[in-house]
Image (spheres, grey):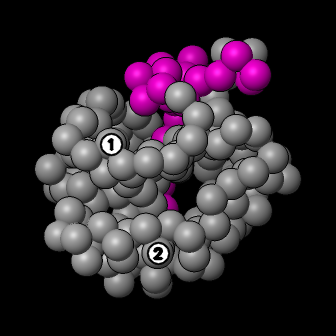
Amino acid sequence: MEGKGAVIGKKAPDFALPDQNGGNMPLAAILAKGPALLVFYPGDFTVVCTRQLCNYRDNMEEFSKFGVQVVGLSANSVAEHALFAKKYEFPFPLLSDIGNKVAKSYGCSSWMMLGGQSRAVFIVNAKGIVLYRYVEPTALTARSANELVGIIQDLRTNKLL
């Protein structure tokens, strides 16, 4: 399941999860606003996850140029997400995937993480089709905002997004 590449034509697994404010956020509601970058990450307040999400926060204008929403998902609780989002002023929702059920449905649970969630990104168009996926080979690496914006730009150029 590790590696990158297009998964054009594959429907994104559906979900509805609570966000850091306790509201319910179904995938359909996210995609009703446009395409999404789903960011699966191992945990709030960890060094690599914090750096990754802050990089995305600092580049929100670039994602917004393409109408792409950023959504973080991890097994942390709603309360932990609320503290994390407030401390780092994330302008995007953090969804609580207790038990990693959604992560598993997207194929980003790992034996290296002892069945826990691997770091992964998915670009899903507004029709709910996965156009790109990358599951990190280790918990210490993450795709940069610049790399993802380049991929989004290529998808737009090819009229896929």
Residue 67 visible to the viewer: no
User: What percent of the width, then of the height, locates residue 72?
Assistant: 52, 49
**In the displayed structure image, the side of residue 2 where residue 61 appears, left or right:** left
Residue at 50 percent across and 67 percent down: it is 148
| Highlighted magenta segment, given as a residue range | 92-113
Q: Amino acid at mark 1?
A: Val
* Mark 1 and mark 2: Cα distance apart in space: 17 Å
Residue at 40 percent across and 33 percent down: it is 17
Which residue was labeled with disc 1? 7
Asked if residue 21 is positioned above or below residue 66 in the image, the reply reads: above
Query: Residue 150 got which mark?
Result: 2
Q: Residues within 10 Å of mark 1 (few under 14, many from 20)?
A: some
Q: Amino acid at mark 2?
A: Gly
In the image, 132 versus 97, the foreground residue is 132
In the image, 10 versus 33, the foreground residue is 10
Q: Helix, strand or loop at disc 1?
A: loop
Q: Residue furthest right?
A: 47
Q: Helix, strand or loop at disc 2?
A: helix
User: What percent of the width, then of the height, locates residue 73?
Assistant: 53, 41
Quarter holding residue 2: top right
User: What percent of the width, then of the height, locates residue 50?
Assistant: 75, 57
Residue at 76 percent across and 39 percent down: it is 138
Total of numbered circles in the picture?
A: 2
